[in-house]
Image (spheres, helix red, strand yellow):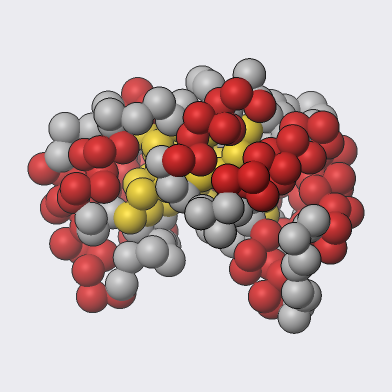
Amino acid sequence: MKYRSVLFVPGHEEKKIKKAYSLDADLIVIDLESTVPNNEKEKAKKIIRSCSVDKNKTYIRINDNSDLNFVTSENFPGVFLPFTESEKQLKEIENILKKNENLKTNIIPILESINGLANLQEICSFKDRVNLISFGSHDLTKSINLKVSEDEKEILEFRKNIVSKSINIEKPIDTSYLNFKDLRGFEESCLLAEKLGFGGKACIHPDQIGVSNKIFS
C-alpha cells in the first residue's frame, strides 16, 4: 500500500467523497469521527454505501467500536483508530473484527495523546493488525495546552519518538497541516517530516496531495 498522501474526507459529504477518487491521493480515509456531526454519523454510513468508492485504497476512521460492524460488512480493508492508547484497546478491537470480518482488517493507530505515546512500543508491537501508525498532533497539543508555532518545533520530539519507536514497521504517517491555504508551510512541514523518517502525510485538502506525493516519493 502506498501512503505518500493520505486524504481525509468527511463521511457525510457525498460530493467530497466522490471527488476524492478523481484525485491522486494514495490512500483515502473516509471519516466517521471528528469531522462528522454526531447527528449525522449514521447518515454518513448510508452516504458511503451509496458512493462508488475504491475499497482497495479506502480506510475508515471510526468514531467508536460500533462502527466496526459497518467496516466489516462493507469489506473495507482497514481502519484508522483515533486516540489509540494501549495494546489492550487493540486486542478488544481485534476480537470484534474476528467475529465479523470476511477479509482481514488492518488497523492504523492514530497517536494523539500522551497516554498513547507512552505506550507506543506495545502499540507498534501489535503486528497481527498494525503495520503502520499515524501521528495526530492537534488533539495532542490541545490536551496539554501546547501552542505550536509555524516551524512546528514544539512537536519535534514527539515526531522523533514516533519514528524511533516504529522502526520495525512501515514508516509512519505524519500529522495534518491545518492551514490548507498555506502550501509553502505545508511543503516545509512535509520536508521536515520526510527528513525525520516519516513515509507520508495526512492531507485535508486536494491542493496538498501533489506536494505530499512529490516529497515522499
Q: In which quarter of the image is residue 130?
A: top right
Measured from the top left, where is residue 204 in percent x and y?
46, 50
Give the left or right position of residue 161, taking residue 54 as reference: right
Where is 80 relative to 140, above or below? above
| Horizontal relation, residue 19 to residue 33: left or right | left
Which quadrant holds the C terminus? top right
Which residue: 16% across, 62% down? Answer: 43
Q: Which of 166 and 194 is in front in this view?
A: 194
Seen at 14% across and 53% down, the residue is 46
Looking at the image, how many numbered discs can be counted on the residues?
0
Write the residue at 19% across / 48% down: 15
Residue 196 as seen in the image, left or right of residue 187: right
Q: From the viewer's perspective, is 74 left or right of 143?
A: left
Residue 156 position in % (x across, y down): 85, 53
Identity of the residue furthest to the bottom in this view? 145
Judge by depth and name the residue closer to the eye, 117 or 98: 117
* Residue 167 position (above or below residue 165): above
User: Please, is residue 197 above or below residue 60 in the view?
Assistant: above
Q: Looking at the image, can residue 77 be seen?
A: no
Q: x, y percentage for residue 13?
A: 23, 55
Judge by depth and name the residue closer to the eye, 38 or 199. Answer: 199
Q: Is residue 186 visible?
A: yes
Across and down, in percent, residue 206 comes to 41, 41
Residue at the image position 69 percent from the left and 77 percent from the top: 143
Instruction: Name the outermost residue toward the left.
Output: 50
